[in-house]
Image (cartoon, grey):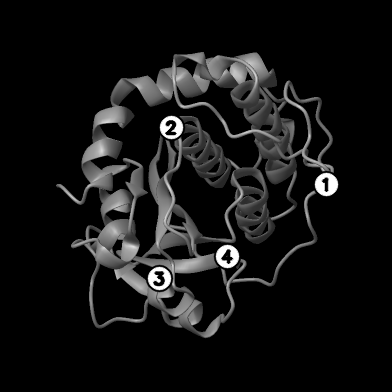
Amino acid sequence: MLATPATGPLTRPRWSVVVAAPRAPGAGSFGRLAAPVPATGSDCAGGALGLVSQADAACRWILGASSPAELLQRSVVAACELLEVPLSWVAVISGGELHVAAHHGLRSTDVAKLWCMPIGAGLAGRVAATGETILVHDWQEDPRRIPGSPSIVEAEGVRSGIVAPLVSAAGIHGVLALGDRRLRDMVPIKVAVATEMAARVGEALRDPVDRPRYPGLGASGLLRRIRKRFSRAAVGVLERAGRGNP
């Protein structure tokens, strides 16, 4: 499996999209939403469609990377900007373990250099084993954490977050983790967008030759794909995982 060294931060993404919701005052060119994304059946309009428009543009920017290392670094930068979290990291599978290959927003990079997790252990290892996204309501209290090892969660004071698999038809390549130092609930559409972004990265790792030809699905096409993926199994899994149940 691919393993790349952690790299320094890239410049802030500069994708340009037309969103269906108004931009927040002073928002950058990625077009942050002014209103929270609705978590109900009406999420196909307004804020959610705007978020998905941005996600489609972000995927094009990510997959335009010139190397696997840049691809992974772009993915963590875009995840933070798009989903409005302060930190994100990618861990890839090598020798039966996860190792950090890219990160963004960490206050200290020392722990990231030392961090590793066996497949199936902890939250990241569980996602790498099952291919199912985990929504973490409170990382500090989650019983699935592995105590006594170098921990990004401990070092950064992470409370809430999402861990999504980098998955393709060939298997699971690693995980994309997003963290917030505050306790917060991620609305379902944001969890689904994170899952879809991670899948795009996983597919690109499997077939780097096809990566530059990604045409973008458009907001409606990506939203249909997200709904299909998200509705298959994720809702029940996310609820159980978020409460710390197996």
Mark in front: 4 vs 2: 2
Residue type for callout 1:
Gly
**Nearer-N-terminus badge (3/2):** 3
Q: Nearer the viewer, residue 173 or 49?
A: 49
**Looking at numbered disc 3 in the image, what kind of residue is underneath it?**
Val
**Residue behind mark 3:** 153
Q: Residue, x 31% and y 67% (percent of image)?
A: 140
In space, the residues marked 4 and 1 are separated at their CA atoms by 23 Å
**Horizontally, is 88 left or right of 78 in the view?**
left
Instruction: Compare marks 1 and 2 and give the one earlier in the sequence.
Output: 1
Tell me which label, 4 or 3, sits earlier in the chain: 4
Earlier in the chain: of badge 1 and badge 3, it is 1
In the picture of the structure, the residue carrying the numbered disc 2 is 188
Viewer-closest of 24 and 10: 24
SS for dot 3: helix
**Tag of residue 102:** 4
List the residue tagged with mark 1. 28
Q: Quadrant of the N terminus?
A: bottom left
How far is disc 3 from disc 2 in space, using C-alphas?
22 Å
Name which residue type carries label 4.
Ala
- For label 2, the SS is helix
Whole-number angstrom distance, CA of label 1 to CA of label 3: 28 Å
